[in-house]
Amino acid sequence: MPVITVFSGSYCNEKQIVQEIASRTGYRKLTDEDIVAEASRLSGIPENKIVRVFSDKVSVFNRLTRERERSLAYLRMALATYLAEDALIIGGFAGQLIPTDISHVLRICLIADMTFRVATAEKELKISSSEANKIVHRDDVQFAAWVHMLHGVYDPWSPSLYDICLPTDKTSLEDIAMTIEQTIANPVFKLAGPSRSAVDDFMIAANVEIALVKKGHDVTVEVKDGLVTLTINKHVLRLSRLEEELKEIALTVPGATAVETKVGPGYYQTDVYRRQDFDVPSKILLVDDEKKYVQTLSKRLMMRELDSAVVYDGESALNLVNQEDEPDVMILDLRMPGIDGIEVLRRVKETHPAIEVIVLTSQGSEADKKTCMELGAFAFLSKSVDIEELSKTIKAAKEKIHQTRTETKSG
């Protein structure tokens, strides 16, 4: 029996349509919430972090943590696990992750005219037409970003992505369900040998992605009949050495019979491939209004394999923390316009005490140092401090974080 995926514009009556299809076919319904929960169970990554991948907003720390790539890999693994079954209806974003060579999947798009969607949102949410219009347009931006990331297509409703596109404002619920019911009766959507093999390859690819990202690597993974192809899209100085390491990791995955590597178009751009070292603090945030100084500091730390993100004022730092995009270690200037460093420190330690804050200032007094240490700063340093000493302090903060997390888990 086939699998049905449903990707729908917001306020296009998706829930009612999926329910009607399920009632007629007896197929099991799966939502994004179900697949995220399974990915969380498999990975140990909190659900609220995995679900972020569906958003068009990427964490400022993602290039340091590879959290988005890890979440995507575990979502694919969760999907592959479910696809071991058939007779499924998968609604939402996650269904877009299923490769096109899995041929027993009927891909459906539900969409409606903007006026219909806005009117539906206005009625359901009991809001004004202008507010409803903003919500629907915001949703479409998110849908477009998701589809473009996966398929390179800017139009999330492009017919090239689906087997059937159905206008829910012009077609009755019964007619939509009947069309789908008739379509899945076509033998082309039967779970046959090639499609089953493609599901197996999908699972192997997910496991290879996970194995690689755990070692700090970021490459594109494709699998066909057990042959793993790894595409390197960033320039690397010792390509052959990287290829050997990637192959060695991929071949540890069950089902990977052989591995080949190649370079993609991005390899010839200016970006440089860097393996992420997860033994150092993965999320360091530099907060300083002196742009030239903090950008130079970030580069000097990178040379010591301490990569970081940068913001230029206290408000931006607090916004990151409050949006659950918090760092592990914060390097904080004391004197900044607007919200100063002492107030940032106070608020951070009140709401997120696990963040280790290193105050780095050129204007701090002994009284400032006393205040900061009482508020919970990990260290209070002068901007004239040697870069090696700062690096050691950051690593000491990392060690404290690691020890605290270990004690929490064991407790």
Image (spheres, rainbow, N blue to C red):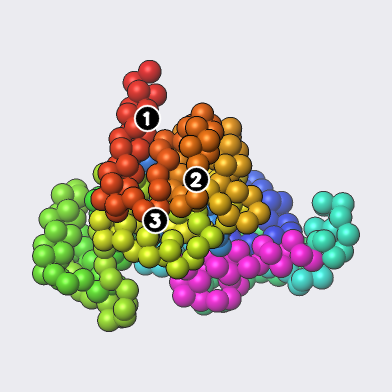
Provide the secondary structure element on which disc 1 rests: helix
Q: Residue at 82% across / 61% down in the picture?
A: 131
Ranked by sequence position, the earlier of labels 1 and 2 is 2
Look at the picture and state if 211 lies above or below 40.
Answer: below
Q: Which mark is residue 8?
A: none
Provide the secondary structure element on which disc 2 rests: loop
Please identify, in this view, whether the residue under mark 1 or under mark 2 is nearer the observer.
2
Q: Which mark is residue 405?
A: 1
Type of the residue with mark 1: Arg
Question: In x, y percent, where is residue 58?
Answer: 50, 59
Whether tag 1 and tag 3 are in contact, CB under 8 A, the answer is no
Whether tag 2 and tag 3 are in contact, CB under 8 A, the answer is no
According to the picture, the residue beneath numbered tag 3 turns out to be: 308
CA separation, marks 2 and 3?
23 Å
Report whether 222 appears left or right of 19.
left
Please identify, in this view, whether the residue under mark 1 or under mark 3 is nearer the observer.
3
- The region drawn magenta spans 133-157
The answer, for residue 355, to whether it is visible in the render is no
CA separation, marks 1 and 2?
31 Å
Q: Residue at 49% across / 66% down in the picture?
A: 291
Question: In x, y percent, where is residue 282?
Answer: 36, 48
Q: Residue at 81% across / 61% down in the picture?
A: 132
Look at the picture and state if 366 lies above or below 35.
Answer: above
Type of the residue with mark 2: Gly
According to the picture, the residue beneath numbered tag 2 turns out to be: 364
Question: In x, y percent, where is residue 389?
Answer: 28, 46
Q: Residue furthest top?
A: 411
